[in-house]
Amino acid sequence: MAQFGFCAGTYTSQSVNADCQLCMGWYPESDESGSGKSAVVLYPTPGTRPFAAFSGPSIRGQWSINGREFAISSTSLYEVFSDGTTRNLGTVADDGSPVSMTSSPQQMLIASVGQCYVLDLLSNVLTPVPVTNFNQLISQVEYCDGFFIALGANSQQVYASAPLDATTWPGSSTAIVSVFSDNIIAMRVDHRQLWLFGRKASVVYYDSGNTPFPFDVVPGGFVEQGIIAMNSTIKLDNSVFWVGGDERGNLMAWRASGYTPTRVSNHAVENAWQNFSTAVDARAYSYQDRGHSFWVIYFPTANQTWVYDVATGSWHNRGFLNSNGTIDAHHSQNHSFIFGKHLVGDWNSGRIYDMSIAYYNDLDGFPIKRIRRAPHISRENEWIFHQSLQVDLESGLGPEPPLLDGQGNPVAPQVMIRWSDDGGHVWSNEHDVGAGQAGQYKFRAILRRLGRSRDRVYEISTTDAIPWRLVNAYLKADAGYKPQERLATQFRKVS
């Protein structure tokens, strides 16, 4: 039997005949020992369980500080407790869009629909900031070195509060960003520095101790890349990430290496994003789990969720399987790590979910659709006779007691296998292959008598609520078959 690069991330090229790989509901993990059974394995993405619920249509923002968790649903600010109970702390303006939240140890500042609000974390009193403190609406807020910072919407203006006081905004403590002509779309504080992102370029400020505005441009802190989606920028892996562009184009994913933007998207990801009708509404959060640092990007209009894994440099997709069989974006758009849990806010309901790989379904028992579409199997377009395909998975993980069919017979978890013989355009019917009952650790998932093809793409999918862990897949084909080397391997041989 031959391996054929089964375990990898999503990579669908402009032409599916060239490459049409998909990885949804799994993420690749490299074997760091170098001596494992497979160099790369696929592990299941986490499931979700309800943790707290509100009456609003979505969770517009989350923030945690000093062991306390806060969330905004519709017009209401709530504190969320470790047992999932909540209390209402006041009202903010609402238009359905995400809010911006930040805090000091004593105060939390919120920007919602252009209006700012301050929550006193000692008295739990929520107070609107008078609009007269600013000469415009506020789009985002941040905190750095004891100062609260507010970004004027559709402008180049940035405001700084009085030290440690989000209720006081001296009229002279403001600055106009003039190093480029575009408005500032987004901002992010990282390493005690203020990143200000324009449409085609960005600039970094530091706390220089100046008065009345305490920040000044970092020498050499000019970045020749801007941002396309205001809510796409996040902090992750000791750096800043964003979905951006410049005067030549847009929709590439960037990571800051010092003040130099480093591309972390690839041609397949960029092609997919370019096909969206819009991506300016992208919303992102980051989290770390089991040594993997994930950048989760939700595209509302495209109804898709894309995830970048810093550990492997690969991309995968996550989705939500509806009862009618369609797949929506993953039901999360913001995140807090609090109470020892990854809590995520739903874009489609006023719910916060506990997200964990210990959960094998979503929300209130919805199955998770996991799909892996493998690389092309071709030998210079000559006929290949496929005798059998074996999916090397961790078997014997079926539920205990086992699931039963309509006649009361035990049913093993199933792997659904289908294939395309025309480059990924048209697909066969699905063929179910058992993955073994609980305790059947030697069970092999094999499908035989698969016909012939000049070019074949295999796809497997699962929905059963077990921890699907895929080690590899092996193809037994006619004599002389071996997988076609990837271009990267060929290049290494001649370099």
Image (spheres, helix red, strand yellow):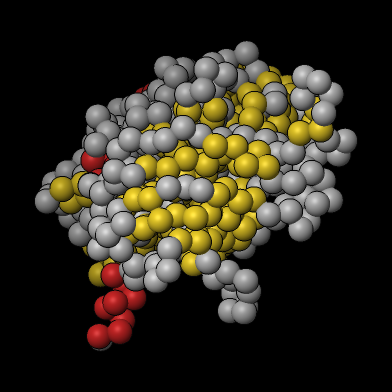
Q: Quadrant of residue 273?
A: top left
Q: Which of the two residues, 74 or 446, is positioned nearer the viewer here?
A: 446
Which residue occupies 84% across, 51% down? 439
Residue 195 at x, y = what percent? 35, 54
Report if residue 443 is visible in the image: yes
- Where is residue 253? Give x, y as percent: 32, 52
Of the pair 325 and 63, the residue shown nearer to us: 325
Left or right, 242 with reference to 416: left
Q: Is residue 308 above or below residue 460?
A: below
Relative height, residue 23 to residue 292 (above, below): above
**Furthest residue in direction right, as rendered:** 401
Relative to 88, does residue 116 appear above or below in the rendering? below
Q: Residue at x 42, y 35 (%)?
A: 428
Q: Is residue 46 found left or right of 474 in the rendered image?
A: right
Residue 105 in sight in this render: no
Closer to the camera in the image, 198 or 304: 304
**In terms of depth relative to the viewer, which is nearer, 33 or 438?**
438
Quadrant containing the C terminus in the rendered view: bottom left
- At x 61% / y 51%, what residue is drawn? 446
Residue 320 placement: quadrant: top right
Farthest residue to the top: give it: 55
